[in-house]
Image: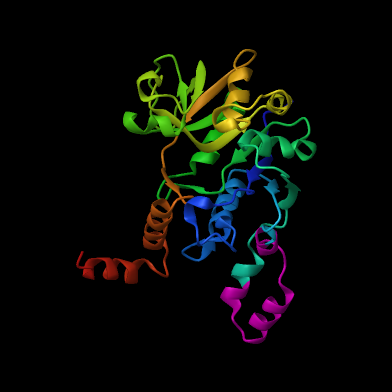
Amino acid sequence: MSNQVTKAVIPVAGLGTRVLPASKAIPKEMMPVVDKPVIQHVIEEAVAAGIKDIVLVTRSGKAAIEDHFDCHYELEAELERKGKTAILESVQNILPSDVSISAVRQDKALGLGHAVLCAAPIIGNEDFAVLLPDMLINCYGLPQTDLSAMVETYQNTGCGQIMVEPVPMEHVDRYGVVDCSGVAITAGQSANISRMVEKPPIDEAPSNLTINGRYILPARIMELLKDTKPGAGGEIQLTDAMADYLNEGNLQAFHMSGKTYDCGNKAGYLQANVVYGLQHEETAESLKAFIKELDI
C-alpha cells in the first residue's frame, strides 16, 4: 500500500459545555472566527494537506454543520441578483469540487476513541487523519501548514504521526503526553514515540510534549479501538489505542511549528478571533487601530 492519506475523521458530536451559553442552540463548531465558522477553518486545513474525504462524526442538533457545506440555492440566487459577486463566490466555493463530506452518528458520548471508531465503516482499511474541530493550528507566514508537513513526513517514513506541542510542565496533567525516550525534537522534526500517557500527574509526566488534536493513523488503530476499554474519565480514549499500537508498530511525534488556539474554551476562542482578525485583509487595519485605542 502506498503511503497516501486521503480520508479524515472530524468528531463534532461534543456538547460544547466550555463555551455555554453560546453553544446551547448553535454547534460550537459553527461559532465564527472572523468570517468563517471554526469547522470551516479546520476542513480547509485538511483540504490543503491533500484530504479528499471528510467524515463528520456527529449527533442530533448538529445539522447546521452539514448545511453549511451544502448548497443554499435561495441565498445564492439573491446574491447573484444583487450582483454581489465576491460574497457569492465565498459561499459557493467553500469546498473544492473533488472534496466530499459525509456524516455518521455517535449515539452515545463515550469518548474520542469511540467517536473515531464510529467512522470505521467509511474509513475501511485505509490509513486516515483525525482532526479535532475546536483546535485551530495557525501557520500564518509559514511555507506550509503543519498538517501538510506532517502528511509529507508520514509519506516519507510510513509511520503514523501525532502532532505535539510543548507546554509548561505545570500544565501537562491536562493533556495526552508523549515519551520519545529523551530524544529532543524541534519544530518540523519527528521522533519515535516509546509510550503515551493520558493526563499524567505532573511529577510522573515523561515530557512536556502534548498531543494537540492532529493525527495521521494506521488503519490498524480502528481494530484496536474495538477492544479498547474505558480509560481516563471513564471514556474510550484514542490515546489508549495508540499506546496499544506501539506494541506492534511505530508512531512518531511531529513537533508543530505554528500556534494552537483552543476554540473549545472562551479564552482560546477570543484569542483566535483577535489573531485571525489581525491576519485578515478586510479587518486587520481597523482591528489594529481599535486595539491601540483601548485603555485597559
The segment highlighted magenta reads 64-88
In the image, residue 234 above or below residue 261: above
For image coordinates 74% across by 47% down, the residue present is: 105
Q: Position of residue 287 (x, y in %)?
A: 33, 68
In the image, residue 130 above or below residue 134: above
Q: Position of residue 106 (x, y in %)?
A: 71, 44
Main SS of the magenta part reads helix
Question: Where's the C terminus, which quadrant?
Answer: bottom left
Query: In front here: 267 or 36?
Result: 267
- Within the image, what quadrant is residue 231 found in? top right
Question: Where's the N terminus, which quadrant?
Answer: top right
Q: Position of residue 78 (x, y in %)?
A: 67, 83
Q: Report how many numbered discs are placed on residues in the image.
A: 0
Looking at the image, the residue that sits furthest to the front is: 234
Q: Position of residue 220 (x, y in %)?
A: 71, 24
The reply to whether residue 208 is in sight is yes
Query: In front here: 189 or 68?
Result: 68
Task: Inspect the magenta stretch and tell me whether residue 101 lies in it.
Answer: no
For image coordinates 57% across by 22% down, the residue present is: 251
For image coordinates 60% across by 46% down, the residue present is: 46
Task: Inspect the magenta stretch and tell me whether residue 83 lies in it.
Answer: yes
For image coordinates 70% across by 42% down, the residue present is: 108
